[in-house]
Amino acid sequence: MKKITLLATLMIVALLGFITSASAIGTEKEYTPVPTSEDTVTAFISSIHNDNGHLTIKADPIEWYEGAAADQKFKEREKEAFEELGGAPDNYYIVNDDQTLHTYEVAPDAQVLMQIYDHDGTYEGIQINWNEPVSLDKYVAIMNNNKLMDMKNFPYHLVIQDGKVVKIIQQYIP
């Protein structure tokens, strides 16, 4: 069931990408990869909770690869598919060998940057806005609204400092 939901969401996102890509062309903002660092964890977020004023995220850390690094890892792990396709599909590759969930506390002043989400309850309102800042309250609402697209199907880059998430960046996937 989870695979069907993921597939359906990815198909909707792909279709919306075709529809909304024209709006992204000619804007000052373009997709840029999130820089890797020792304090950044990339993960799929399974839940987000506010417990007694403390926001926590349960997430499954993954390995995220883009560009040449994605091609290399794809070639290492899926040689036959690499030979057939010539590289990683859509220029990214995810490795998730350990699906253990980790709990992260979110700093009350954490910054959140979204790429795509349901802005107004309509498919037309699902637009790509690169690195659109949203408040933590809005982020919680976005994550808990899966009527048109399930935001838990996107990876997120979590910047962690002093044991707390200080920045959440949604990773767009075509």
Image (cartoon, rainbow, N blue to C red):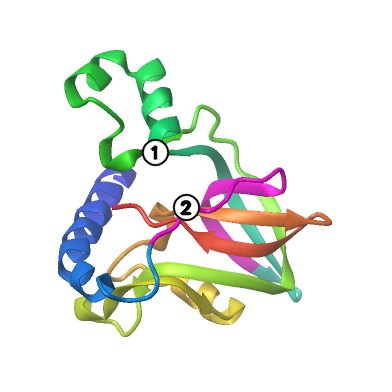
Where is residue 96? Give x, y as percent. Answer: 48, 32
Q: Marks 1 and 2: CB-CB under 8 Å? A: yes
Residue 30 or 107: which is nearer the viewer? 30
In this view, the residue farthest toward the right is 162
Q: Secondary structure at mark 2?
A: loop
Where is residue 116? Give x, y as percent. Answer: 36, 68
Q: Quadrant for residue 13, please give it.
A: bottom left
Task: Answer left or right for 64 relative to 37.
Answer: left
- At 45% from the left edge and 73% from the top edge, which residue is drawn? 142
Where is residue 154? Give x, y as percent. Answer: 41, 54
Disc ID at residue 33: 2
Residue 36 counted in the magenta span? yes
Q: Bounds of the magenta span?
A: 31-49
- At 56% from the left edge and 47% from the top edge, which residue is drawn? 42
- At 32% from the left edge and 40% from the top edge, which residue is drawn? 91
Q: Residue 144, can we see it?
A: no
Q: Residue 76, can we see it?
A: yes
Between disc 1 and disc 2, whose residue precedes? Answer: 2
Position of 132 relative to 43 (above/below): below
- Which residue is disc 1 drawn over? 67
- Crowding at dot 2, Cα within 10 Å, few <14 / some 14-19 / many 20+, comes out as few
